[in-house]
Image: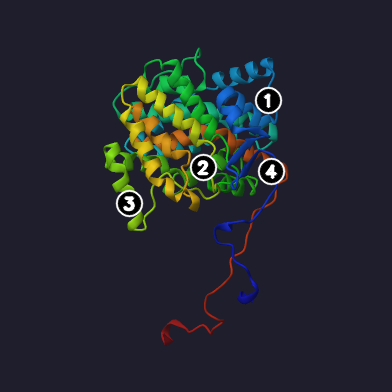
Amino acid sequence: MSDNVKINRGLKGVYFERSGVSDIDGARGELTYRGYSIHDLATQSSFEEVCYLLIHGELPTAEELAGFDARLRAARVLPDPVHDIIAACRDGHPMDVLRTAVSALAALEPASRDTGEDAFVANGIRLTAQVPMIVAAHQALRNGRDPVAPDPALGHAANWLWMLKGEPPSEAAARLADVDFILHAEHGANASSFAARVTIGTEANLHAGIVTALSTLAGPAHGGAAEDVMKMVREIGRPENAAAYVRAKRAAKEPVTGFGHRVYRREDPRARHMRDGVRQLGEEMGAPEWYEILQAVVEAMAPYARHGLNVNVDFYSGVIYQLHDIPMDLYVPIFAIGRMPGWVIQCIEQRRSNILIRPLTLYTGPDPRAYVPLAAR
């Protein structure tokens, strides 16, 4: 039988379901959310509007957006026991703390147990507002500070920076964080979204799907690229060292972090928007050298673009976080903040036409054999 079975390891190239959310054209380097180009959304939209678009399928009217935004702001509340749990886990990795806190919310908020579609939407909006609160509260508590209360006057991205740093962000910094969240909001059947769908396929609630997604994102092969890029930039140190660094990596047949993508054969379409943001934020904060190092690496990697080794979105993200003095172990939780609406709609889609996701594995173990009693072994 094994000779007649084709194995698609990692499910590469396998279509397991239909989706009306995002379309990725890897050959052309294009990405759309609900038919809208990521370039238009990154330059003209807001994260709140993109959340509405992903969850409801259409761009909102001004009235609809105001109502949705009001729901997000009203949901910036964590039960007191969650703060206690975060404090008890303060020495843990932020992704472990985030996962644990979301799991606690499932137990502490009775509405989380409802598995109807309206409940998925309501719980998804609430979790989208709560996840950045958890990350910011943990950052404060592990540094001996009280968590910063959310500011109802600030939008989602600006409020996140306010809670994290305790000072109002500049308009440019808030906008860049907003764009960062937009670019990470949804990306098809990536590992964490697929894992969430597997969980929802068992008829579990939304919180269970999000906990699964967080657990999957925590693996360095999925969510750790931005952190690895920042380590690389620090190792290179100066723009003039980039070419030698790349030559050494290529000679050793080692990957250069931030280049290449499982899907895209051309430049990741999200990367250009982060590139501009790094340049502008670096100039604003008096640290243009980080951008210069990144661009020197891009120039050194140019000859390999024909092999599909183009820059991806995470190549620039880490430096943006560094410019905000954000610790590297928060880079993946920030990814999770942006990805929340994508996970929510993937879970909603799975629930609408639910089927238990149960692939097969091809057995390659021993042939049938007789059991030998313990005394005779």
Mark 2, secondary structure of its residue: loop
Q: Residue at x 52, y 50 (%)?
A: 262
- Please say if the residues under marks 1 and 4 sit with CB atoms less than 8 Å apart: no
Name the kind of residue labelled 3 in the image: Arg
Badge 3: how crowded within 10 Å, few (<14), some, or many (20+)? some
Q: CA distance from mark 4 to mark 2?
A: 24 Å
Judging by the rendered image, the residue that carries numbered circle 4 is 19
Can you give x and y, in whole percent of width and height, for residue 189 in the image?
A: 60, 46
| Dot label at residue 59 | 1
Judging by the rendered image, the residue that carries numbered circle 3 is 247
- Please say if the residues under marks 1 and 2 sit with CB atoms less than 8 Å apart: no
Judging by the rendered image, the residue that carries numbered circle 2 is 267
Sequence order check: which comes first, mark 3 or mark 4? 4
Residue 46 in view of the camera? no
Q: Residue at x 45, y 26 (%)?
A: 133
Badge 2: how crowded within 10 Å, few (<14), some, or many (20+)? many
Which one is nearer the viewer's eye here, 155 or 125? Answer: 155
Mark 4, secondary structure of its residue: loop
Sequence order check: which comes first, mark 2 or mark 3? 3
Q: CA distance from mark 3 to mark 1?
A: 46 Å
Name the kind of residue labelled 4 in the image: Ser
Name the kind of residue labelled 2 in the image: Glu
Quarter of the picture holding the N terminus:
bottom right
